[in-house]
Image (spheres, rainbow, N blue to C red):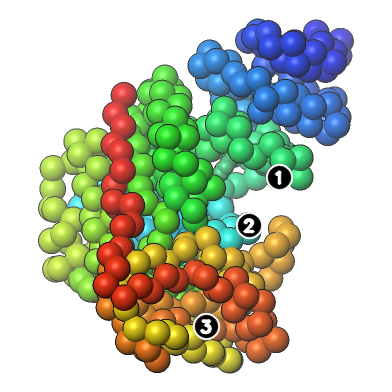
């Protein structure tokens, strides 16, 4: 096959701040996926994009080229509208777990194709894999059956979905080019559009525990993704939400499953419950589903019924005890006062060091590892009160986790907490 471009032409165009043509974009993505463009060439182009940006036409074409590198799911056999959410990830962000069965209980179909975590933010699949027997890998036919029978499926994206993104994401990770908004937006949206959902609600996190710590940049990322989704015919809205403090009172895989089940049982921490209900209402209203209100579906047990069905359909036992770690360590307040802040990133890194996260792809996790949080910003604590319980299977991990927790909490006599509001911005096309 005669290639229509040479990679150096495309790299030089972006290096010199020129626009890439549609043909160039289609070719470079296809040629990179086919192995014709080398990693070092794509690395140079990614860095040029990070430095010089792309306009909305280029981002949209880049996203389409990534979608076209693989298969597109089709849920037209279903008798109800598909509606999904994507979070850019944060510490203690377990919202997908209660949210998917909750929306199913209210009449939506939720096709959640998720990933595993890397670094300090945990992945949804890692959390669910702490449930004995639960299986993340499903065939397309199995996905459809679980979705049809239970109203929601949470499973691993198949290798055929946006394969260009899989290669590009791994390369960005090792070339310091993850942070470019055009690359993040196209990476997330290519997978979500290929997933075939009709409605998508984006939860774009901001604050020290999110990978977009600046709210203005998080807003820009959210607007870029809403535009991409809308252009592709997916009804897309975004919320920019707080991630300066961990969500809820648990960080770590099995611990977060336990908290999600508490929410499904009508309890759980107020911030997790509130964000779950808010996102569920967005998913339902964007899909024009006017059934039961999500707050009622948490109270009447129907969301829990959908959770149990969904977990069982993928081999999991919803009644089995969740794994717990072998060792624990308590961290107590050194003086009395009001807790004015809790640094989400430090808590996330501590949990990761305890064994809840991985530092390279494929690394095995400890299902029971993580952190329980006993007090949050705004609460008054006394000297000696319990702040955190750390859990791990290997006590040698405590030292490094405790290092990360140093300075994670501020306690001030008569101080006031000033956390980010839970919802910072809402974006509609
Ligand atoms: N998540 C993704 O899927 N892609 C990115 O680029 C960043 C976060």
**Which image quadrant is residue 53 in?**
top right
24 or 70, nearer to the observer: 24
- In the image, residue 205 sits, relative to residue 19, either above or below, namely below
Residue at image location 62% in from the left, 75% down from the top: 403
Q: Are marks 2 and 3 in contact (CB under 8 Å)?
A: no
Labels 2 and 3: the sequence-earlier one: 2
Q: Which mark is residue 118?
A: 2
Q: Which mark is residue 173?
A: 1
48 or 68, nearer to the observer: 48
Which quarter of the rendering shows the N terminus? top right
Q: Can the viewer see residue 21 in this picture?
A: yes
Could you say where residue 124 lies in the image, as x and y percent from the top left? 49, 60
**Which image quadrant is residue 401 in?**
bottom right
Q: Are marks 2 and 1 in contact (CB under 8 Å)?
A: yes
Secondary structure of the residue carrying tag 3 is strand
Could you say where residue 145 lies in the image, as x and y percent from the top left? 41, 53
Q: Which residue is mark 3?
A: 390
Residue count near mark 1 (Cα–Cα under 10 Å), binned few <14, some 14–19, many ≥20:
few
Residue count near mark 2 (Cα–Cα under 10 Å), binned few <14, some 14–19, many ≥20:
some
Residue at image location 63% in from the left, 59% down from the top: 119
106 or 325, nearer to the observer: 325
Judged by depth in the image, the label closer to the viewer, 1 or 3, is 3
Residue 10 lies left or right of residue 326; in this view the side is: right
Residue at the far front in the pictured view: 413
Secondary structure of the residue carrying tag 2 is loop
Residue count near mark 3 (Cα–Cα under 10 Å), binned few <14, some 14–19, many ≥20:
many
């Amino acid at each position: 096959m005669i290639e229509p471009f040479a990679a150096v032409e495309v790299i030089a165009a972006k290096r010199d701040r020129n626009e890439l043509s549609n043909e160039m974009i289609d070719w470079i993505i296809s040629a990179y996926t086919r192995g014709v463009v080398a990693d070092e060439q794509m690395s140079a182009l990614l860095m040029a994009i990070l430095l010089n940006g792309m306009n909305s036409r280029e981002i949209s074409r880049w996203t389409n080229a990534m979608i076209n590198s693989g298969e597109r799911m089709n849920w037209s056999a279903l008798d109800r509208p598909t509606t999904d959410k994507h979070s850019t990830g944060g510490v203690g962000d377990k919202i997908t777990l209660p949210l998917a069965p909750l929306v199913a209980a209210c009449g939506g179909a939720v096709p959640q194709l998720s990933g595993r975590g890397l670094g300090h933010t945990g992945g949804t699949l890692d959390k669910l894999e702490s449930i004995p027997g639960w299986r993340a890998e499903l065939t397309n036919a199995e996905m459809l059956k679980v979705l049809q029978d239970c109203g929601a499926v949470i499973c691993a994206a198949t290798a055929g979905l946006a394969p260009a993104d899989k290669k590009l994401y791994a390369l960005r990770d090792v070339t310091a080019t993850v942070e470019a908004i055009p690359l993040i937006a196209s990476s997330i949206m290519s997978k979500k559009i290929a997933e075939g959902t009709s409605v998508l609600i984006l939860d774009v996190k901001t604050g020290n525990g999110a990978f977009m710590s600046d709210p203005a940049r998080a807003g820009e990322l959210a607007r870029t993704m809403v535009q991409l989704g809308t252009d592709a015919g997916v009804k897309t809205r975004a919320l920019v939400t707080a991630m300066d403090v961990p969500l809820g009172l648990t960080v770590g895989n099995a611990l977060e499953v336990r908290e999600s089940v508490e929410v499904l049982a009508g309890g759980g921490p107020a911030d997790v419950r509130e964000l779950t209900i808010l996102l569920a209402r967005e998913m339902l209203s964007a899909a024009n589903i006017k059934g039961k209100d999500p707050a009622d579906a948490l109270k009447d047990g129907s969301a829990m019924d959908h959770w149990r069905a969904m977990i069982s359909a993928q081999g999991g036992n919803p009644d089995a005890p969740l794994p717990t770690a072998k060792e624990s360590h308590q961290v107590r307040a050194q003086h009395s006062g009001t807790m004015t802040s809790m640094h989400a990133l430090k808590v996330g890194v501590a949990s990761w060091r305890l064994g809840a996260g991985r530092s390279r792809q494929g690394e095995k996790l400890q299902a029971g590892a993580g952190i329980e949080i006993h007090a949050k910003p705004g609460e008054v604590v006394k000297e000696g009160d319990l702040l955190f319980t750390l859990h791990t299977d290997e006590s040698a991990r405590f030292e490094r986790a405790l290092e990360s927790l140093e300075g994670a909490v501020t306690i001030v006599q008569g101080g006031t907490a000033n956390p980010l509001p839970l919802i910072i911005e809402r974006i509609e096309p």
